[in-house]
Amino acid sequence: MVRGPFACPHLAVSRSQGGDVNRYKKTRTLSREDAAYIAGLIDGEGTIALSRKHRQDNRQLAISIANTETALLEFVRNATGVGKITRKRIAHPEHTPSMTYVVTNRQALALLSQIAPYLRSYKARRADLVLEHYLRLTPRNGRYSTQQHIERERFIDEFQHIRP
Protein backbone atom coordinates (compact mmCIF):
# COMPACT_ATOMS: atom_id res chain seq x y z
CA MET A 1 0.00 0.00 0.00
CA VAL A 2 1.41 3.38 -1.03
CA ARG A 3 1.40 6.12 1.61
CA GLY A 4 2.37 9.77 1.49
CA PRO A 5 1.56 12.60 -0.89
CA PHE A 6 1.58 10.33 -3.95
CA ALA A 7 -0.93 7.82 -2.60
CA CYS A 8 -3.84 9.85 -3.85
CA PRO A 9 -3.09 12.60 -6.39
CA HIS A 10 -5.89 14.94 -5.26
CA LEU A 11 -4.61 15.05 -1.67
CA ALA A 12 -2.02 17.54 -0.52
CA VAL A 13 0.11 16.96 2.54
CA SER A 14 1.36 19.59 4.95
CA ARG A 15 3.09 19.44 8.30
CA SER A 16 1.61 21.28 11.24
CA GLN A 17 3.70 22.68 14.10
CA GLY A 18 3.46 19.41 16.02
CA GLY A 19 4.89 17.40 13.14
CA ASP A 20 1.56 15.69 12.37
CA VAL A 21 0.64 15.16 8.75
CA ASN A 22 -2.65 16.86 7.82
CA ARG A 23 -4.28 15.84 4.57
CA TYR A 24 -6.62 18.07 2.68
CA LYS A 25 -8.10 17.54 -0.73
CA LYS A 26 -6.98 19.64 -3.67
CA THR A 27 -9.55 20.74 -6.22
CA ARG A 28 -9.23 18.64 -9.36
CA THR A 29 -8.51 20.26 -12.72
CA LEU A 30 -11.77 20.40 -14.68
CA SER A 31 -12.29 19.93 -18.40
CA ARG A 32 -13.58 23.04 -20.17
CA GLU A 33 -16.97 21.38 -20.55
CA ASP A 34 -17.24 20.49 -16.86
CA ALA A 35 -16.06 23.95 -15.80
CA ALA A 36 -18.68 25.58 -18.02
CA TYR A 37 -21.41 23.22 -16.80
CA ILE A 38 -20.60 23.84 -13.13
CA ALA A 39 -20.48 27.59 -13.80
CA GLY A 40 -23.97 27.31 -15.28
CA LEU A 41 -25.20 25.47 -12.20
CA ILE A 42 -23.74 28.17 -9.97
CA ASP A 43 -25.20 30.96 -12.12
CA GLY A 44 -28.62 29.33 -11.95
CA GLU A 45 -28.88 27.49 -8.64
CA GLY A 46 -25.81 28.54 -6.68
CA THR A 47 -24.16 31.23 -4.63
CA ILE A 48 -20.73 32.75 -4.29
CA ALA A 49 -20.59 34.20 -0.81
CA LEU A 50 -18.35 35.40 1.98
CA SER A 51 -19.97 33.78 4.98
CA ARG A 52 -19.29 33.07 8.63
CA LYS A 53 -19.67 29.75 10.38
CA HIS A 54 -20.03 31.54 13.72
CA ARG A 55 -20.76 35.17 14.57
CA GLN A 56 -17.23 35.85 15.86
CA ASP A 57 -15.48 34.18 12.89
CA ASN A 58 -13.96 35.95 9.92
CA ARG A 59 -15.85 35.62 6.66
CA GLN A 60 -14.70 32.82 4.39
CA LEU A 61 -15.29 32.14 0.72
CA ALA A 62 -18.11 29.65 0.13
CA ILE A 63 -19.55 28.34 -3.13
CA SER A 64 -22.80 26.41 -2.95
CA ILE A 65 -25.35 24.81 -5.27
CA ALA A 66 -28.82 23.84 -4.06
CA ASN A 67 -30.83 21.24 -5.96
CA THR A 68 -33.32 18.41 -5.54
CA GLU A 69 -31.28 15.97 -7.66
CA THR A 70 -28.62 14.20 -5.64
CA ALA A 71 -26.97 12.81 -8.78
CA LEU A 72 -26.35 16.31 -10.12
CA LEU A 73 -24.65 17.43 -6.90
CA GLU A 74 -22.66 14.18 -6.73
CA PHE A 75 -21.43 14.88 -10.27
CA VAL A 76 -20.09 18.27 -9.09
CA ARG A 77 -18.44 16.75 -6.00
CA ASN A 78 -16.90 13.92 -8.04
CA ALA A 79 -15.70 16.25 -10.82
CA THR A 80 -14.10 18.71 -8.39
CA GLY A 81 -12.89 16.16 -5.82
CA VAL A 82 -13.83 18.57 -3.01
CA GLY A 83 -16.83 19.82 -1.07
CA LYS A 84 -19.68 18.17 0.73
CA ILE A 85 -23.37 17.54 0.14
CA THR A 86 -25.83 18.14 2.96
CA ARG A 87 -29.58 17.68 3.18
CA LYS A 88 -31.73 20.73 3.77
CA ARG A 89 -34.49 20.67 6.33
CA ILE A 90 -37.98 20.21 4.85
CA ALA A 91 -40.24 23.09 5.92
CA HIS A 92 -43.47 21.52 4.65
CA PRO A 93 -44.32 17.87 3.92
CA GLU A 94 -45.35 18.69 0.34
CA HIS A 95 -41.90 20.15 -0.48
CA THR A 96 -39.41 18.02 -2.40
CA PRO A 97 -36.35 17.06 -0.35
CA SER A 98 -33.41 19.28 -1.29
CA MET A 99 -29.63 19.08 -0.90
CA THR A 100 -26.79 21.58 -1.03
CA TYR A 101 -23.26 21.13 -2.33
CA VAL A 102 -20.80 23.40 -0.49
CA VAL A 103 -17.08 24.03 -0.91
CA THR A 104 -15.16 26.64 1.10
CA ASN A 105 -11.91 28.55 1.47
CA ARG A 106 -8.90 27.63 -0.72
CA GLN A 107 -10.74 24.75 -2.37
CA ALA A 108 -13.53 27.16 -3.34
CA LEU A 109 -10.94 29.62 -4.64
CA ALA A 110 -9.34 26.91 -6.80
CA LEU A 111 -12.77 25.97 -8.18
CA LEU A 112 -13.64 29.61 -8.79
CA SER A 113 -10.45 30.18 -10.77
CA GLN A 114 -11.52 27.41 -13.18
CA ILE A 115 -15.19 28.37 -13.62
CA ALA A 116 -14.92 32.18 -13.58
CA PRO A 117 -14.53 32.57 -17.38
CA TYR A 118 -17.88 30.81 -17.85
CA LEU A 119 -19.99 32.73 -15.33
CA ARG A 120 -22.55 35.06 -16.93
CA SER A 121 -24.53 36.58 -14.07
CA TYR A 122 -23.55 39.12 -11.40
CA LYS A 123 -21.62 36.22 -9.89
CA ALA A 124 -18.94 36.81 -12.56
CA ARG A 125 -18.18 40.20 -10.98
CA ARG A 126 -18.06 38.62 -7.53
CA ALA A 127 -15.70 35.93 -8.83
CA ASP A 128 -13.38 38.51 -10.43
CA LEU A 129 -13.25 40.52 -7.19
CA VAL A 130 -12.48 37.41 -5.12
CA LEU A 131 -9.81 36.17 -7.52
CA GLU A 132 -8.13 39.57 -7.50
CA HIS A 133 -8.10 40.24 -3.75
CA TYR A 134 -9.01 37.20 -1.59
CA LEU A 135 -5.57 35.62 -1.19
CA ARG A 136 -3.85 38.92 -0.44
CA LEU A 137 -6.48 39.83 2.17
CA THR A 138 -6.84 36.40 3.80
CA PRO A 139 -3.68 35.30 5.63
CA ARG A 140 -3.63 31.55 6.33
CA ASN A 141 -2.87 32.12 10.00
CA GLY A 142 -5.89 34.42 10.45
CA ARG A 143 -3.75 37.27 11.77
CA TYR A 144 -4.45 40.54 10.04
CA SER A 145 -2.33 43.67 10.14
CA THR A 146 -4.29 46.87 10.74
CA GLN A 147 -3.96 47.76 7.06
CA GLN A 148 -5.07 44.27 5.95
CA HIS A 149 -8.08 44.49 8.25
CA ILE A 150 -9.15 47.85 6.80
CA GLU A 151 -8.64 46.63 3.21
CA ARG A 152 -10.47 43.38 3.95
CA GLU A 153 -13.49 45.26 5.34
CA ARG A 154 -13.59 47.39 2.15
CA PHE A 155 -13.31 44.24 0.04
CA ILE A 156 -16.19 42.56 1.92
CA ASP A 157 -18.34 45.67 1.61
CA GLU A 158 -17.66 45.91 -2.14
CA PHE A 159 -18.38 42.18 -2.54
CA GLN A 160 -21.68 42.40 -0.64
CA HIS A 161 -22.86 45.27 -2.85
CA ILE A 162 -22.55 43.19 -6.04
CA ARG A 163 -26.10 41.93 -6.46
CA PRO A 164 -28.43 40.98 -9.30
Image: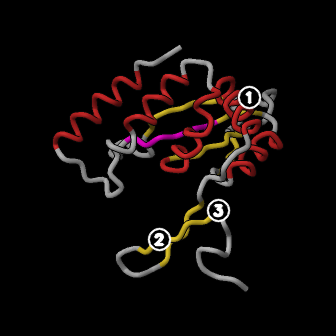
Q: In this figure, what is the number of numbered marks?
A: 3
Residue 97 locus on image (x, y percent): 78, 36
Name which residue lies at 61% across and 52% down.
Answer: 27
Q: Give the residue at mark 3.
A: 10
- Mark sitting earlier along the chain (3/1): 3
Q: Nearer the viewer, residue 50 or 108?
A: 108
Alpha carbon separation for disc pair 3 and 1: 39 Å
Q: Is label 1 in a helix, a strand or a loop? A: loop
82, above or below 41, in the image: below
Q: Residues within 10 Å of mark 1 (few under 14, many from 20)?
A: few
Q: Give the residue at mark 1.
A: 92
Seen from this angle, which residue lies furthest bottom? Answer: 1
- Mark sitting earlier along the chain (1/2): 2
Residue 152 locus on image (x, y percent): 29, 36
Find out whether residue 63 is within the magenta segment.
yes
Q: Which residues are magenta?
A: 59-64
Give the main secondary structure, helix, strand or loop, of the magenta stretch. strand
Name which residue lies at 58% across and 46% down.
Answer: 103
Alpha carbon separation for disc pair 1 and 2: 45 Å
Task: Please give the label number shown on residue 14.
Answer: 2
Q: Residues within 10 Å of mark 2 (few under 14, many from 20)?
A: few
Q: Are marks 2 and 3 in contact (CB under 8 Å)?
A: no
Name which residue lies at 60% across and 79% down.
Answer: 4
On screen, residue 33 versus residue 109, left or right, reads right
Q: Are marks 1 and 2 in contact (CB under 8 Å)?
A: no
40, above or below 79, in the image: above
